[in-house]
Image (cartoon, coloured by chain):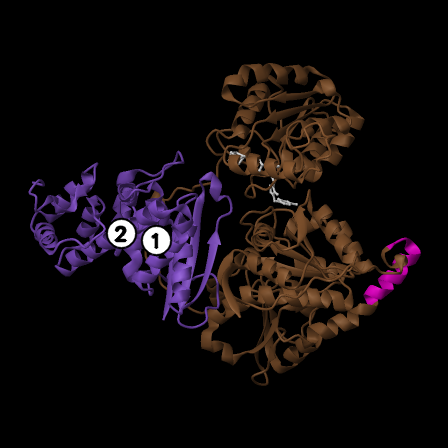
Amino acid sequence: MNFDLVLCGVGGQGVLSTAYVVDHAAVEAGLHFKQPEVHGMAQRGGAVSAQVRLSDGPVSSDLISDGAAGAILSVEPMEGLRYLKQLRPDGWLVTDVTPLKNITEYPDLERLFHVLFSVPHVIAVDATKLAAKAGAMKAQNMVVLGAAARFLPVPLALLERHITALFQPKGERVVTANLKAFRMGVAASAFGAALVARGVPRPLVARALARLDFQPVEVDELVVKAWADRLAGVDGAAVAQRVFASRELLPVDVLTANTLN
Amino acid sequence: MDSEILLGDEAVARGAIDAGISAAYAYPGTPSTEIFESLQTYVKQQKLDVKGLWSTNEKVALEEAIGVSYCGKRSLVAMKHVGLNVAADPFMNVAVSGAWGGLVLAVADDPSMHSSQNEQDSRYFADFAQVPCFEPADQQEAYAMTLDAFALSEKLRVPVVLRLVTRLAHSRALVALGERSAQKPLRYVDDAGLYTLIPSNARRAYAGLVGKQAALADYAEQHASNALTIRGEQLPGLIVSGVAWNYLREALGPRLEDFNVLRVSVYPLPVKKVRALLDASSDVTFIEEGYPFIERFVSALGLLREKPLKGKLTGDVPRMGELSPDVVRRVFGLKVAPTLTIEGLDGVLAARPPRLCDACPHGDSYNLINEVLKELTPGMRVMGDIGCYALGYYRPYQAIHSCLCMGSSIGMALGAAHAGVSPSLCVIGDGTFTHSGMTALVDAVHEDLPVKVFILDNSIVAMTGGQPVSVSDEQVVDLVAGLGVKREHIRVVSPLPQKHAENLAVVREELAHPGLSVIVARRACVRYAKEIKEHKRERDAAHHHDGGCQDCTGSCR
Ligand SMILES: Cc1ncc(C[n+]2csc(CCOP(=O)(O)OP(=O)(O)O)c2C)c(N)n1
Ligand code: SF4
């Protein structure tokens, strides 16, 4: 088993904390790993990235090859796309949808999202807003990690244990918020997978997921069914478009509550 | 045995501590900074008695380490590759005098220039000085070879270079740690001539260094990590060094079995093994990270034609930039993995270059400089230097027109003045000024031409992550005055938007002065406010509180 991972974002977005959690969880799971990182001038808002190479045997190269990553975990949508060359054609891009526009030439959002949703396997969540709801603005990295957790060859419980260990020095409140953020990501990802399993086209799932508010628990079966029926229906694309156009996060039970017409 | 997840840099730090160092010195620089950073943290955490500091520059750092070595104790000194240029004088000479306590230089190269001006390969420096060099391939070797390096240094009384590269320095892996050796006792050499390199002694010492070469060659020849594997007569051969070994294994996989391989990790080059590989192989390809160092020796610059040799000199391996598994695959004509093609992707990727933080004092200094530039001869050039403020090259400032090496701006401005530029402007950070700008200022004092030096005093070495500056606040002014600049032409301004007009008046006054002026733009870096406070506290605490000091907030006042 070999699993390569790219982690990316902008300086200050917690990319290296995510790496810490994955590294430690991997060691505890008995895996070998190497984890290079690029943080030259991160503090001044530049791009930051790390790679994690996981394997059940010794890892030779620190660097991954192009087309080798099983997943890209990004805390910023354009940054996620930046590393697409490293993704396996069947690999997953898991990203926050909230852009960080600290440059003047930030691309047009409509074009950016068009490209993002044409990636074959993408999970886009509003990690920034979900993290705020979880109680820690900075926990967007944990939402993304949660959303990607099902692809990683490391048990969920180990990831949670090392999230706890990482934030313990900052106090119980920070630990709780980060775990909550992580579980929101897990719920979002499972919800997306359930929709796909029910036959909803992936691009529609991706768009809807990006504007939904998740609780740190699994989404109710009835809610899943309501969404699947709606998105797989004749006006599914229009619904997905409408959901994605929303400025606020919509509660995931918005359909069953009958407030989305 | 304990295992810990460590960066390559951290593995070196832990290796040094476990080798029983008594002191460590460093000057920050990517990708070497984490060596001393982690060492300092660990020493504090474990309450170890290991001395040392962020030195004022690399030359001083090495000299401090040499002092420890001459007293019989072990010491580590860490720097980035260009730092060894600054430390070259003591380095070349301590090679001649020899070490006494183990002396190891951990030098981190930066192929691909992720955060450097060049790709220089420190193996050349080690070779130039005729001292051994270790080139670990991974974090575990970084730890183990640090221990080896100290042992060798002491055994043969030579300084030893440990060469890291970015991808090892800044990559984490699990490292198994061993036992810690005790520190060495203070023991003097009772022959002062050994370390007093006046010509008569130097000739004797140099003969000593030349005399050590056979033992060093022997050591490299025997070292287990210089591994020669001959799999068959007239198979193709490979010579591979350092981290390139990882990429090669990844790229070739089981195909590696079809080659004769010499892996090199310890220099001087194990020439007997190289000879054996050449004899046994149909041809030889060189895979090394950095300059074509081994290839130049073995191929005699392409003059050796007894076997086909392929590498960076022949264009078979890319000459510039770092290697990767894919680069190595292409060298051997192997397939690389397919990647996604997404329509419109390039159109939505904008570069995200580093930029000055919001409210950074350097931004206000550049606004000031740009404003006065408009009043001067069009096309005026400002000599720049290295630090966060080098970002003043970019929009929206575009205020500096050079950045060569640390400390160069003042000398270049003086040169420009000699070339007829008047006034001749330059900017230099407070850290860079004490690193290597001060000596040039002494020349500028001597010439007293209209050179206008802006010292951007942000109270920290920011660029490399917030290390302490050697002098701060009024000390900067005193230092500049002490170097001979007239007090009335040392002006302190506070680079803030609301003080723009006031500051402008000060700068204009100094531009009108026909001699040397120093304008200290003093405002603390906003990003490292916490560290600046912490450094101040530490400086005060380290003071000898004898009641006599003027500027101390400690208990003596
Ligand atoms: C010889 C050498 N050593 C180290 C470095 C790495 N380096 C680049 S800038 C810098 C320090 C800059 O500090 P300062 O002048 O105080 O400017 P600031 O970043 O705080 O604005 C260092 C250490 C280098 N480029 N060259
Ligand atoms: S780290 Fe400090 S000196 Fe560097 S850009 Fe930020 S505020 Fe300016």
> Is residue A81 visible to us here?
no
Count residues near mark 1 (Cα–Cα under 10 Å), then give few for <14, some for 14-19, many for 20+: many
Mark 2 sits on what residue? Answer: A185
User: Chain ID for label 1?
Assistant: A
Where's residue B29, x and y in %?
60, 47
Where's residue A10, x and y in %?
41, 44
Mark 2 CB in 8 Å range of ligand 2? no
The residue nearer to you, when weighing A168 against B204, is A168
Q: Which mark is residue A73?
A: 1
Q: Secondary structure at mark 2?
A: helix
The residue nearer to you, when weighing A80 against B310, is A80
Quadrant of the rendered structure where residue A28 is?
bottom left
Q: CA distance from mark 2 to mark 1?
A: 12 Å
Of the two numbered discs 2 and 1 in the rendering, the one whose residue sits closer to the viewer = 2
Answer with left or right where residue B270 lies relative to residue B504. Answer: right
Count residues near mark 2 (Cα–Cα under 10 Å), then give few for <14, some for 14-19, many for 20+: many
* Chain whose colour in the figure is brown: B
Where's residue B353, x and y in %?
46, 40
